[in-house]
Amino acid sequence: MRAGEYDFVVVANRLPVDRVVAPDGSVSWRTSPGGLVTAMEPVMRAADGAWVGWSGDTDETGGEGGDTAAPFDEGGVHLVPVPLSSAEVEEYYEGFSNGTLWPLYHDVIAAPEFHRDWWDAYVAVNRRFAQATAAQAAEGATVWVQDYQLQLVPAMLRERRPDLRIGFFNHIPFPPYELFAQLPWRGQVLDGLLGADLVGFQRMSDANNFLRACRRARGLASRRQELVTGGRRVRATAFPISIDSGSFDALARTERTEGRVAEVRFELGAPRKVLLGVDRLDYTKGITHRLKAYGELLADGAVDPEDTVLVQVATPSRERVASYRALRDEIELTVGRINGDHGTIGRPAVQYLHHSQPREEMAALYRAADVMLVTALRDGMNLVAKEYVASRHDERGVLVLSEFTGAADELTQALLVNPHDINRLKELILQALAMGEKEQARRMRALRRRVLEHDVTRWASEFLRSLEQLTDGGSPVAVEPAAGAERTALAADRAADAVGAAELVR
Ligand code: ADP
Ligand code: F6P
């Protein structure tokens, strides 16, 4: 295959912008939802590379060979749309990515579904992404594959283009083997990821889950975060992602934002205290747990709706997937009940918005919130928590943060909570509402130090430096495992599991 012209190529399920076709046929582009785009956009603007991804609409010519949109340049990035037919959107995106992998990788909070035709579509679409990427990458280029929708791309790409340096980053958790083992195609998924030189995860526990899966399902020996397969070294370790902290901090300081903060607080009935939740509308985010805790505090009389309001901003997400539709109904029913029971005219107890907001408005909301509630049941990182901290140059505000987010490993000065423990969540909400300014400032200073020092540029450069070191000289280091090492690794892993199980019983 002929090489392309880009030395750096990012490949992600989505482009940073979605193609929106209006009823009159006119086409416009809108920022795509989610943490991946938030994180990758500033990295790509600085890199002068190509971004291969789906444009978010469907191509009725049938995906393969379709031409929804030709490559185009935006903000210094070369965008290469990959077409998907509506059947592929159903089977690859809504089906295998978000009906199988997403719940499986998030502690099976919802039940994953396993369908062979979804898997077939996943394989076909991953192949198309690999082909499109191979056509863009220059000889010896660095390709960075993103997230769970494209786990087969590293191996498919390596097969076509062994000259490439390939990194993979998983934005969501990687499950313990006991859950991952349910996947009928677990071996193929691991083989796909093992096509990369470097496989990055949010937390060390995710990386270790992956290495253990490689030992269990593929019999591969690993040592110090590395294993050897097909004569190549593959490294799997943690690179906790972040945000463009400096630009969020700057945005929160502008006169315009300050003005908007005052307006928002006035509209919410200042001096009422403001609690805030900001999430994609997803069952992993624990929105119903948050509403339950807040509703009970109102019902107990521990919180007075005259003095306090909860603002819940929920971005529409994956709206054709049944579990997401059911969640939206449940949330809206609960919000309606709470407002019916506790609201007054012009003064709802919960202000609920089901749409996306511009970044400026997000910064103003963060600045206006006395308490930020992040109650995810499982989350790879949670960038909202970091955005809240980056916006608080006034060193005010309290972050209540779920232990089950990647962010909790870093943001230890937040009020950490198990969101399943509703009583504890209620206590912490009260503690946050009552916290004095001195303690708020002490905690926020420490949080800000972490978020401002560890920004997304540092994340990307640490990943890419590590990838470069690993493949120094262009070709991956060839090391053969000692004869029988793989079998020994598997036996050792099984023995370790047996000891672990015996300890549990004891
Ligand atoms: P996920 O990747 O699961 O969506 P994250 O918390 O890591 O979760 O990232 C969410 C990103 O989406 C953040 O950058 C946040 O600002 C943005 N976001 C969430 N809700 C909204 C909204 N209603 N309007 C605009 N942006 C939003
Ligand atoms: O960060 C996790 C993630 O699934 C990204 O891969 C994705 O782009 C984002 O959340 C939003 O989800 P979706 O692309 O399905 O709308």
Image (cartoon, helix red, strand yellow):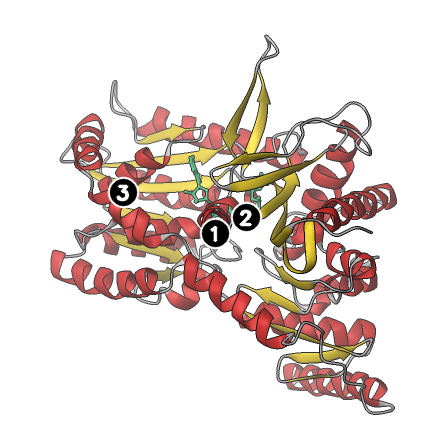
Mark number displayed over residue 251: 3
Give the residue drawn at x 38%, y 52%: 244
- Which x, y percent locates residue 55? 63, 33
Badge 1 amino acid: Ala
**Observer-nearest of 138 and 408:** 138
Marked residue nearer the N-terminal end (1 or 2): 2
Q: Quadrant of the C terminus?
A: bottom right
Give the quadrant of ligand 2.
top right
**Observer-nearest of 423 and 210:** 210
Q: Is mark 2 within 8 Å of ligand 1?
A: yes
Q: Which residue is mark 2?
A: 284
Task: Name which quarter of the figure residue 82 lies in.
Answer: top right
Is disc 1 in contact with disc 2, using a CB cutoff of under 8 Å?
yes
Compared with residue 380, is residue 348 higher up or lower down, i.e. above or below? above
Q: Which residue is mark 1?
A: 376
Q: What is the secondary structure assignment of the residue under circle 2?
A: helix
Badge 3 amino acid: Leu
**Observer-nearest of 16 and 104:** 16
Disc 2 residue crowd, few under 14, some 14–19, many 20+, Cα 10 Å: many
Q: What is the secondary structure assignment of the residue under circle 1?
A: loop
- Which x, y percent locates residue 223? 67, 85
Give the residue drawn at x 55%, y 72%: 466
Which residue ends up furthest to the top in the rendered image? Answer: 24
Whether residue 167 is visible to the viewer of this picture, yes or no, is yes
Q: Which mark is nearer the camera, 2 or 3?
A: 3
Badge 2 amino acid: Thr
- Marks 1/2: CA distance? 6 Å
- Which x, y percent locates residue 262? 16, 33
Give the residue drawn at x 75%, y 83%: 221
Q: What is the secondary structure assignment of the residue under circle 3?
A: helix
**Observer-nearest of 393 and 117:** 393
- Marks 1/3: CA distance? 26 Å
